[in-house]
Image (spheres, rainbow, N blue to C red):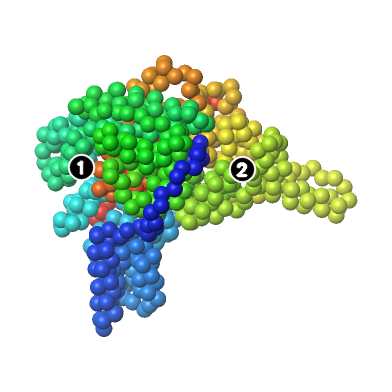
Amino acid sequence: MLASCDGVQTKPDSEVVDTSKPVTEQQASLTSEAREQIRLAENSDSPSQQLDYRIAAIRLYLQANEIIFAKQQLDIINAEKDRPLQDRVNMQIIAGEVALAEKNPTLASEIITEITPVTRNQQLKLYMLKADLDYLNGNYYYAVDRRVQLDKYIVDRATHDLNNKKIWAALSSMPSSQLNTEQTNKAVLKGWLELAKVMRKSQQNIGQLENNLLDWGMRYPSHPAGKDFLTELIDSYQSEVIKIKNIAVLLPMQGQTSTAAEAIKNGLLSAYYLDSTVEPKPVIKFYDTSDEALSFDELYQLALDSGATTVIGPLDKNIINAISQKQELDVPVLSLNYAESSLNITDNLYQFGLAPEDEARQVAELAIAQGKLRAAVFYPDSEWGKRLQDAFTTYYEYLGGKVMSSNDYATDSNDYRRPIRQLFNLDQSNIRIRKVQDTIGQNTQSSPYRRNDIDMIFLVATHRSARSIMPAFKFHHAGDVPVYATSHVYTGSINRELDRDLNGLIFCDLPWVIQNTSPLLKTFNANWPQQENYTRLFAFGIDAYHLIYNLDYLENNDYASYQGETGNMQLDEYNRIIRKLLWARFNNGQPVYFEPEVRTSEADSVTN
């Protein structure tokens, strides 16, 4: 619903700005260094030296997130086949790094499997690739364990620092349930796990963060993260409590989105009043964006004149479209929706929403990580359904999968038989049966069989549709094919009677819904039982409040994440919040949280 909150068109801003994303100073420097390596390669007479220079250029391009340029150099070195064995292994390693940078686990796994190291350095590089592949596939604990082992063999400072950051990225991405239950007798690994627990708890109690981290340092005085890395964590937060003194919240108080806005407001205020660790407590003030007489610029200036140091909102997509074309904002703005364009050129604008397309892409990620490379997609003939179908298909095929069959169904009918028969090619099977009967001149005892070239189904549906579609899948001989869906198949409240037909259906959803341990759940249920259907938006409001204290940390550390009620969150390069959700499977009419089993490389050691 938030993704389609178009609302009332606001007054457009007159300024015209360059819509290209500015290149950072670091990106420019890395790109310049890469070009210098290419120049050295072109001026060298030694094929091995040329290869080394181009590989160095590729790594620099990858650091600058210039993957297209990296692939161009990879094509150049792959064009020459007659190379010594050691050079060929180096070419495989850099090809694996490019595949991982593209987030293509299928290709990366194929490349990594073929690598046989010749030198000790190549052996370490291969182990790093395996750790990165584990991370990409969601095997975060394996990735942490590998990199803790790697640390003993790393000699240079830059690689050591990068290894620490990748350990932290994997720990930060680990679901809280897994983080809290993992046990180990390895001292260094245990220290990392404990540091991640301390950090996660403190991110929602910012006033206690520094003391909690220093306490960890006292308990693990000789840990490799206890010096520079711990200081870096503390420095990321030490000024945030001081900076946030006055919070302005821009929400529509009237109109068609006012009920949704009310749920967000309730969640935000509940988090605000529960947070007793920030002293002095910031002032919070609400502004109504549904007043057509006031543009965003006027409301924004009104908030600034009242002393606002941080803005949460707006919710309206049209307003955010206009904001995202500005050059800069005077104070940080955390919008509660996404602009239509993923390109955000506005300094101080951070975008946060519950976009359904993100969920469709996470289904694609999980399917690929589980080795399910051939999909069928069943979606409603609505604008929403087509958006999710497109998001899934595009990303699934980008990651190496193939959509074998895709059919829509009518939203104004409860009869799904015809589109399901088309999805599974059952009509063709019936035609073949009739041809056989015509040939032999008599009826035969046979049943139509569905297509056997799919290993998963992506179902785009609301809970009402899913309750009818799942039994229809089973009736049409697809009961053995795993079905994946987004959070829309679940209301957020347990109803065993109505949801019993959903048994086996796998879907992603918010931690708030799937595995809720927040003390604010009781607050929500006790005070707003009439807003049961808006429980996810209440959680959205909670996270909006806590996120404003974590934005600097997320923006300035590409390995950082924040575990909230709506998911495990990171900032992308355009300052858009990307969420990782939890997974559940319907069992006996209710969703049960589970950690999906995904492909992992063999559990070898660094020295194997």
Residue 45 occupies quadrant? bottom left
Foreground pick, 88 / 248: 248
Residue at position x 29%, y 55% from top?
Answer: 128
Q: What is the x, y in percent for residue 227?
A: 12, 44
Q: What is the x, y in percent for residue 23?
A: 30, 60
As drawn, which residue projects farthest toward the bottom?
Answer: 45
Q: Amino acid at mark 1?
A: Ser
Q: How many marks?
A: 2
Foreground pick, 260 / 79: 260
Q: What is the x, y in percent for residue 556?
A: 25, 48
Q: Amino acid at mark 2?
A: Ser
Q: Kindly report the distance in space between the C-alpha atoms of the residues bearing marks 1 and 2.
A: 44 Å
Residue at position x 52%, y 48% from top?
Answer: 392
Can I make out residue 600 in this image? no
Rendered position, 358 above or below 197: below
Q: Are marks 1 and 2 in contact (CB under 8 Å)?
A: no
The residue pinned by badge 2 equals 382
Is disc 2 surrounded by few (<14), some (14 to 19) or many (20+) residues within 10 Å? Answer: few
As drawn, which residue projects farthest toward the right?
Answer: 441
Q: Is residue 484 left or right of residue 561?
A: right
As drawn, which residue projects farthest toward the front?
Answer: 293
Q: Is residue 260 left or right of residue 136?
A: right
Q: Is residue 465 left or right of residue 158?
A: right
Label at residue 127: none
Residue at position x 15%, y 58% from top?
Answer: 156
Rendered position, 344 above or below 551: below
Residue 284 occupies quadrant? top left
The residue pinned by badge 1 equals 236
Q: Earlier in the sequence, mark 1 or mark 2?
A: 1
Residue at position x 74%, y 48% from top?
Answer: 427
